[in-house]
Image (tube, helix red, strand yellow):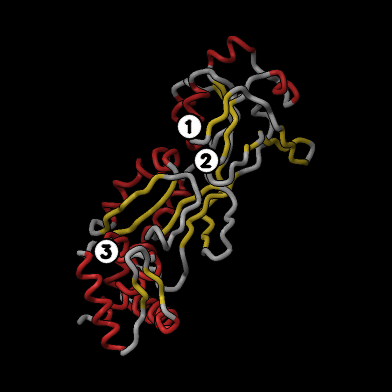
């Protein structure tokens, strides 16, 4: 038995509450996962997991052993990452979760550069705009905009995204161009509803040194970033997205920036990890690369 592999398998089973899920995340046959856990139990001399036909749960001894396994595996990962060759040539798969809009506007156009720097890392990109369980879903890190609400997670601040207020030329031709914030109350807006929180985001501006939030009532509300931007480009109303997500549409004239005399509060951009200990060299590499990408972007401060 490879004891370290068995410990890794055991921690995955505990975290996912499933032999099948652990096998899927580790690219192992389910039978191998079961056999490794059984061998580990035989080695330590106690039952680590309770198994039924419907679920898997950790025993009291298993919970104590799990904590020690996490610590040991984390220290091994730190030791590996300390080697210069590992830092320069990390290998393996990194699982990243983010929104489809952010992936299309920022991440995907730059991935060729990442692969050139790190040709031995494979990226598995999950697209969602919702709260996920990083451990349960086997995700290494999440790229997220807005405040980080999970106190148990480790967040690295990457930058602050500029927002812009804009509308399609067709909309402005039909309804006119608002000259002041107050004029917005007479216009149609597309409302963005967070699929993570159910919250409808108001338009925000800084005027006279104070942040003004306008809870506008539009006839269309959406909970997907790409749909939100498309709705604005099709003339359904005024939108206030992150500027890096619509910069190409602005350059092509499909969206027109308005009310540019007002400053808009920025939105934070973060990388979120399950925990700091045990951060692999490939996740460290991606984190540094993504932070550098954000630093070079004109719409990310």
> Residue sitting at 70 percent across and 23 percent down?
184
**Between marks 2 and 3, how big is the CA–CA gap?**
41 Å
Query: For this view, does 25 lie left or right of residue 17?
Result: left
SS state under label 2: loop
Can you tell which of label 2 and label 3 is closer to the viewer? Answer: 3
Q: Residue furthest top?
A: 174
* Above or below, 114 relative to 273: above
| Label 3: few (<14), some (14–19) or many (≥20) C-alpha neighbours in 10 Å | some
**Rendered location of residue 105, percent (x, y):** 42, 38
How many C-alpha atoms fall within 10 Å of the one at disc 1: few (<14), some, or many (≥20)?
A: some
SS of the residue under disc 1: helix
Alpha-carbon span between mark 1 and mark 3: 42 Å
Position in image of residue 219 (x %, y %): 61, 22
Vertical arrangement, residue 48 with respect to residue 85, above or below:
below
Q: Which residue is mark 3?
A: 23
Q: Earlier in the sequence, mark 1 or mark 3?
A: 3
In the picture, measured across the screen, residue 37 lies left or right of residue 182, that is left
Question: Which image quarter is the N terminus in?
Answer: bottom left
Query: How would you rate the neighbour count of disc 2 (Cα within 10 Å): few for under 14, some for 14-19, many for 20 or more?
Result: some
Label 2 to label 1, Cα distance in Å? 9 Å
Place residue 35 in its image quadrant. bottom left
Q: Earlier in the sequence, mark 2 or mark 3?
A: 3
In the image, residue 101 lies at what x, y percent?
44, 38
User: Which quarter of the picture shows residue 20?
Assistant: bottom left
Q: Which residue is mark 1?
A: 247
Q: What residue appears at the point 33 percent right and 58 percent down from the top-left corner?
A: 94
Residue at 59% x, 9% y is 174
Give residue 278's mark.
none
Q: Is residue 124 above or below residue 231?
A: below
Q: Are marks 2 and 1 in contact (CB under 8 Å)?
A: yes
Q: Position of residue 258 (x, y in %)?
A: 62, 24
Q: For residue 299, which numbered disc appears in the image?
A: 2
């Amino acid at each position: 038995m490879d004891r370290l592999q068995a410990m890794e398998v055991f921690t995955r089973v505990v975290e996912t509450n499933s032999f099948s899920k652990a096998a899927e995340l580790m690219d192992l046959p389910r039978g191998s996962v079961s056999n490794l856990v059984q061998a580990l139990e035989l080695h330590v001399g106690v039952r680590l997991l309770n198994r039924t036909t419907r679920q898997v749960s950790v025993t009291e001894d298993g919970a104590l052993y799990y904590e020690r396994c996490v610590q040991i595996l984390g220290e091994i990962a730190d030791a590996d990452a300390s080697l210069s060759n590992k830092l320069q040539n990390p290998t393996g798969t990194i699982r990243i979760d983010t929104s489809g809009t952010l992936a299309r506007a920022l991440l995907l156009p730059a991935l060729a550069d990442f692969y050139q720097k790190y040709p031995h890392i494979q990226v598995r990109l999950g697209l969602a705009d919702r709260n996920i369980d990083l451990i349960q879903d086997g995700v290494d890190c999440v790229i997220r905009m807005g405040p980080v609400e999970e106190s148990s997670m480790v967040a690295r601040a990457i930058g602050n995204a500029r927002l812009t207020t804009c509308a399609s030329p067709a909309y402005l031709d039909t309804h006119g161009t608002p000259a002041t914030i107050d004029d917005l109350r007479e216009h149609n807006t597309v409302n963005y509803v967070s699929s993570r929180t159910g919250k409808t985001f108001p338009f925000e501006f800084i005027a006279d040194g104070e942040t003004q939030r306008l809870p506008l009532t539009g006839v269309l509300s959406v909970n997907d970033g790409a749909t939100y931007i498309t709705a604005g480009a099709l003339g359904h109303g005024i939108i206030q997205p992150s500027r890096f997500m619509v910069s190409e549409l602005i350059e092509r004239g499909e969206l027109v920036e308005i009310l540019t005399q007002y400053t808009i509060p920025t939105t934070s951009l973060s990388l979120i990890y399950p925990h700091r200990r045990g951060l692999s060299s490939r996740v460290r590499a991606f984190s540094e690369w993504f932070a550098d990408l954000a630093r070079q972007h004109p719409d990310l401060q």
